[in-house]
């Protein structure tokens, strides 16, 4: 055999060809590799086990439970990083250079476009969007907690956005401290309805 | 082990490496020497050195190749792409596709035999370890068939131990492409729990490498690799392949047989084949173009004093005695497509800007109306894609007269690779407001070496409605206490 010309090989043995023919192409009836069959049957077994474990057994926590757990974790992390917000602590922050400087940086990038870098807003320039933050007149409350609330939740009808979702609790507290640093505890607070000239 | 001491004769009806019962026949190719083997060894080690050294070489402050998925930055030879440039991958992938088409049509499976990491690592690392520990093909086959003994156990333990070690090294360096060497080093020095996903990835990847190179080997090329499967559609009679010159070789006969062809039936070409085929049966899908059979046959031909090249790189046409046509419709079409793709890719890559920006409407109402003006509020997100600080200028252009930009009055400082979000407000005086309009927001560096732009819509009320309203309540709403207060103050 070894010396024969085996480029024109022997015609196939009867039964070694599968009965179907496509475009004149027939297929040998050979056993698939065992490793291939193993992956094939293995993935079927895996699919059944997967379906049973996750959809039927009730052992793993459901997606709802997992999401709730994750939300609790996020909430806890937020609470842990959020500064205490009440009048005395906000006043205290406003005397702390670290807080005020951090607040100034955020203010200049986010708030200065409407309230101006001087914080004087419409008082300085009639075309400015936001009101003066340095005088004793307040539209939405002048106590530290009220100023914090205005920044945090915004004033939708006036166009003041809620900054909590953008900046997060820490930066909102810092910006509040920066605004308060232009005021003194005990300054008179005048409530006005609008800052128009 | 049930393996026979000699592998079965290859035929065209079945894959040699799969037995009748479906089990994997583990091949032990014989040693081979020659010019192609030497050239392949040199290029193989060069490629291994290249693959493994890229994360170590620093270009422009970053590793030569650093696909920083976590930081969403891709550093390629000193060039940085951001995640926003991921669409360029289209050109990379389609370009690789066309290049492979082109090379295959001209040169057949040179990639498989010379450059594919599967072949490179298998031939020059794993099989080398096997060769050093267990000896040549005959000895290895004998060791397979020998009963378990202390020396066999020692050899096998040593071999698989080294396989695991090499696989772990490759897996770690592969991870370094994504996290950089210093980060990898830091990870290796901390507990697995601190970087669990990276640890599991390396474990699984090293396991897959070990399985592939220790046992699976040629099965990947024959059964799994898609390129291996489609290459038969990419080549034609004029593509270069490795083939046997049947006209010269047949009929085969031992030395001295009268009227015999050049082939002395020594079977060396079959013994050295890493995929277990007999190249004399013609071009087959298992052939990875490694040229081992060329070297084996040339050596024998030289020994018996016959001209070499009975098995050689040639086209099917050339092997049949014809002339190979290098320029033909297939190669022309592939090269034209490749040229078009390369041109568009160069255009696309040269258009990559060092910064990007996005603009979104600020939360709340779509527009605001106060005593003086109609107002739209946006948040602009600036992204510096370079690893040096940038100063960017944001301007609103094509504004109608009376419209004013508030915010971004001065250039914005961006740290290296940094992002800055800042508000942009557009105000239009109520007196001249004439309805919604489109304007452009442009971003450029101070020297205006590049410019980016987006069209944005200014939303507002119908001008007639606004005028009616202001006529009706005639600033009634805006006579504020504050105003009165201030007027009083100024008096």
Image (spheres, rainbow, N blue to C red):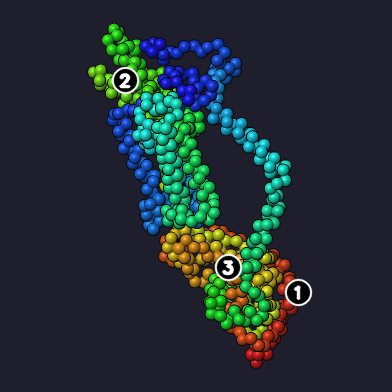
Residue B375 shows up from this direction: no
Q: Residue at x 31, y 15 (%)?
A: B264
Q: Position of residue B478 (x, y in %)?
A: 71, 78
Camera-nearest residue between B475 and B34:
B34
Determine if marks 2 and 1 fall on one subunit. yes
To which quarter of the image does residue A16 belong?
top right
Camera-nearest residue between B283 and A189:
B283
Residue where numbered disc 1 is placed: B472
* Contact check, label 3 and label 2, Cβ < 8 Å: no
How far apart are labels 3 and 1 at the CA level?
Answer: 33 Å
Mark 1 residue crowding within 10 angstroms, few (<14) / some (14–19) / many (20+): few
Image position of A15 (left or right of B27): right
Query: Which of the chains bears the disc numbered 1?
Result: B
Question: Disc 3 vs disc 2: which is toward the camera?
Answer: 2
Name the residue furthest top: B258
Q: In the rendered view, would you say B35 is above or below B486?
A: above
Residue where numbered disc 3 is placed: B423
Residue where numbered disc 2 is placed: B310
The numbered mark, 2 or 1, whose residue comes first in the sequence reads 2
Q: Residue at x 70, y 49 (%)?
A: A62
The numbered mark, 3 or 2, whose residue comes first in the sequence reads 2
Image position of B392 (left or right of B322): right
- Number of numbered discs: 3
């Amino acid at each position: 055999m070894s010396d024969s010309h085996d480029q024109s090989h022997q015609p196939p043995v009867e039964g070694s060809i599968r009965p179907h023919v496509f475009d004149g192409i027939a297929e040998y009836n050979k056993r698939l590799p065992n490793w291939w069959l193993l992956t094939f049957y293995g993935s079927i077994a895996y699919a059944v086990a997967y379906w049973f474990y996750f959809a039927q057994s009730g052992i793993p926590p459901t997606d709802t439970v997992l999401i709730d757990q994750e939300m609790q974790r996020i909430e806890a992390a937020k609470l842990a990083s959020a500064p205490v917000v009440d009048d005395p602590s906000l006043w205290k922050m406003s005397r702390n250079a670290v807080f005020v400087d951090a607040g100034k940086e955020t203010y200049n990038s986010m708030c200065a476009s409407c309230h101006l870098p001087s914080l004087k807003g419409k008082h300085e320039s009639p075309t400015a969007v936001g009101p003066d933050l340095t005088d004793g007149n307040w539209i939405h409350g002048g106590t530290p907690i009220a100023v914090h609330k205005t920044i945090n939740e915004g004033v939708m009808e006036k166009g003041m956005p809620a900054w909590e979702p953008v900046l997060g609790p820490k930066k909102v507290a810092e910006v509040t401290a920066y605004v308060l640093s232009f005021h003194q505890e005990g300054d008179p607070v005048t409530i006005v309805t609008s800052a128009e000239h | 082990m049930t393996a026979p001491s000699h592998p079965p004769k290859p035929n065209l009806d079945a894959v040699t490496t799969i037995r009748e019962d479906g089990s994997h026949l583990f091949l032990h190719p014989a040693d081979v020497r020659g010019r192609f083997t030497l050239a392949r060894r040199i290029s193989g080690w060069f490629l291994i050195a290249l693959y493994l050294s890229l994360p170590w070489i620093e270009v422009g402050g970053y590793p030569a190749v650093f696909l920083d998925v976590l930081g969403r930055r891709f550093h390629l030879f000193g060039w940085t792409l951001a995640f926003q440039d991921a669409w360029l991958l289209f050109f990379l992938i389609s370009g690789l596709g066309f290049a492979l088409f082109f090379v295959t049509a001209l040169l057949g499976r040179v990639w498989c035999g010379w450059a594919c990491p599967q072949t490179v690592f298998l031939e020059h690392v794993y099989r080398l370890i096997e060769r050093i520990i267990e000896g040549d093909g005959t000895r290895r086959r004998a060791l397979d068939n020998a009963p378990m003994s202390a020396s066999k156990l020692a050899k096998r333990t040593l071999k698989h131990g080294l396989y695991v070690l090499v696989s772990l090294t490759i897996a770690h360096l592969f991870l370094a492409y994504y996290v950089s060497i210093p980060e990898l080093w830091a990870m290796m020095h901390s507990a697995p729990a601190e970087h669990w996903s990276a640890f599991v990835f390396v474990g699984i990847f090293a396991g897959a490498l070990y399985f592939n190179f220790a046992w699976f080997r040629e099965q990947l090329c024959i059964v799994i690799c898609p390129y291996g499967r489609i290459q038969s559609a990419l080549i034609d009679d004029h593509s270069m392949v490795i083939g046997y010159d049947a006209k010269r070789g047949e009929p085969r006969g031992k030395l001295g047989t009268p009227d015999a062809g050049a082939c002395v039936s020594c079977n060396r070409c079959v013994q050295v084949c890493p995929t277990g085929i007999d190249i004399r049966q013609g071009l087959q899908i298992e052939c990875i173009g490694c040229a081992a059979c060329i070297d084996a046959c040339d050596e024998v031909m030289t020994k018996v004093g016959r001209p070499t090249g009975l098995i050689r790189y040639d086209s099917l046409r050339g092997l049949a005695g014809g002339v190979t046509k290098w320029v033909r419709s297939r190669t022309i079409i592939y090269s034209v497509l490749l040229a078009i793709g390369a041109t568009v890719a160069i255009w696309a890559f040269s258009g990559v800007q060092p910064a990007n920006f996005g603009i979104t409407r600020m939360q709340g109402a779509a527009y605001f109306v106060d005593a003086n003006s109609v107002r739209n509020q946006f948040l602009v997100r600036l992204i510096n894609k370079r690893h040096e600080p940038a100063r960017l200028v944001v301007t609103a252009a094509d504004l109608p007269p009376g419209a004013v930009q508030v915010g971004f009055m001065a250039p914005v400082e961006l740290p290296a690779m940094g992002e800055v979000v800042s508000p942009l407000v557009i105000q239009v005086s109520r007196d001249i407001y004439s309805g919604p309009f489109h304007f452009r927001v442009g971003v450029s560096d101070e020297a205006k070496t590049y410019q980016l732009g987006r069209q944005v819509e200014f939303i507002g009320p119908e001008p007639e409605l606004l005028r009616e309203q202001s006529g009706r309540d005639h600033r009634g709403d805006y006579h504020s206490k504050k105003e009165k207060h201030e007027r009083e103050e100024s008096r």
